[in-house]
Image (cartoon, helix red, strand yellow):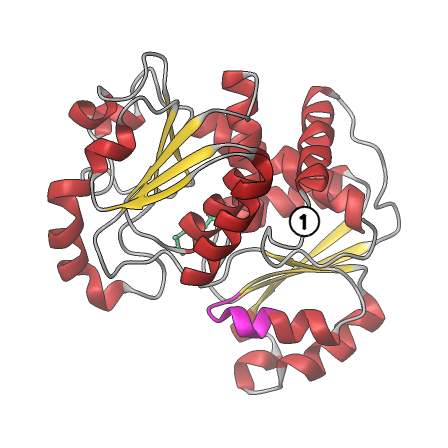
Amino acid sequence: MKGRDILSLVELSSKEINLILQRSALIARQKRSPQQLKGKTVALIFQKPSTRTRVSFETAVAHLGGHPIYLSWNEMQLGRGETISDTARVLERYVDAIVARVYSHEDLVTLAETADVPVINGLSDKAHPCQILADLLTLVQYKKRLKGLKLAYIGDGNNVCNSLLVGCAKTGVNITVARPQGYGPDPEAIRNAKKAAEESGSTVVITEDSAEAAKDADAIYTDTFVSMGMEKEKETRLSTFIPKYQVNKELLRLSKPGAIFLHCLPAHRGDEVTEEVIDGPQSAVWDQAENRLHTAKALLSLIV
Ligand code: CP
Ligand code: NVA
């Protein structure tokens, strides 16, 4: 997998996803990480805020013996109009890989097409592949398998939902997405997920009915109703989503006994999830957040 760009999960085969998950589980058990990035540097470009993605990647690079360079978009010449492709041409002369969080997925594509080093998507408007690797690892840790599980994603059909669709379908997890009409997911992500599901023998269901999604689920997943960059739509979104799509005790009760609650974080208690669910006994969100570190290490060690 050396040299590969990871812009969504579409470019990875199910075998490769499973390899990353196996390596993540191994790394999670090791006290000291293999020094696979010794002497190497990784640029981390952020156009939007981040806690988990930034800190897990910085830590992952350091633990692997390399040196991370955090670059805020507006503190680079990018913020003053230098093009993405010119930036890519320069960075490839210095660093061994680039992780980037951007508003427009197209910018990532340009970065990856121009830079001769691997580019990893740290979140775009379309996809959040690194998050989904951590989510799948969390499912394996709690449920001991992926194939045949049912995951209900309830809420906004956003970047996380798009990648979750593809990641679940590729690994044999049956996924049902419940969201209001007109709020995603991306038609291309649905097409890709359905194609992958045919191969893995899993199912992809998109509905408006949150109870149908939650019924007999092994895991219930939600994300913010107001993603970064959508702040102007906040009021409309909250009034559209909260009444039918908030993950609360009543919705969780419809899932299987022992089902887990997942959230990529940051969470907005009282909006997409109630306090008693996220802080309750079925919540796996802190392990899920920890898994960002293990999966970041596994991914870097395989592609850089
Ligand atoms: N889940 C996630 O990507 O979190 P951050 O926005 O804090 O990086
Ligand atoms: N959907 C959210 C995810 C944050 C990690 C956003 O794009 O803001």
Q: x, y (%) of residue 72?
A: 56, 66
* Furthest-right residue in this view: 39
Q: x, y (%) of residue 253?
A: 22, 19
* Residue 260 in magenta stretch: no
Q: Secondary structure at mark 1?
A: loop
Residue drawn at x 23%, y 21% is 254
Q: x, y (%) of residue 138?
A: 52, 27
Question: Left or right: where does residue 239 sit relative to residue 248?
Answer: left
* Furthest-top residue in this view: 257
Above or below 81: residue 38: above
Can residue 247 be seen here?
A: no
Residue type at tag 1: Leu
The residue under label 1 is 12
Question: Left or right: where does residue 231 sit relative to residue 153?
Answer: left
> Number of labelled discs?
1
Other-residue count near label 1 (Cα within 10 Å), few / some / many at <14 / 14–19 / ≥20: some
In the image, the segment drawn in magenta is 102-108
Q: In the image shown, does 248 or 205 lie closer to the viewer?
A: 205
Question: Left or right: where does residue 79 sit relative to residue 266?
Answer: right
Q: Quadrant of residue 133?
A: top right
Q: x, y (%) of residue 129?
A: 56, 49
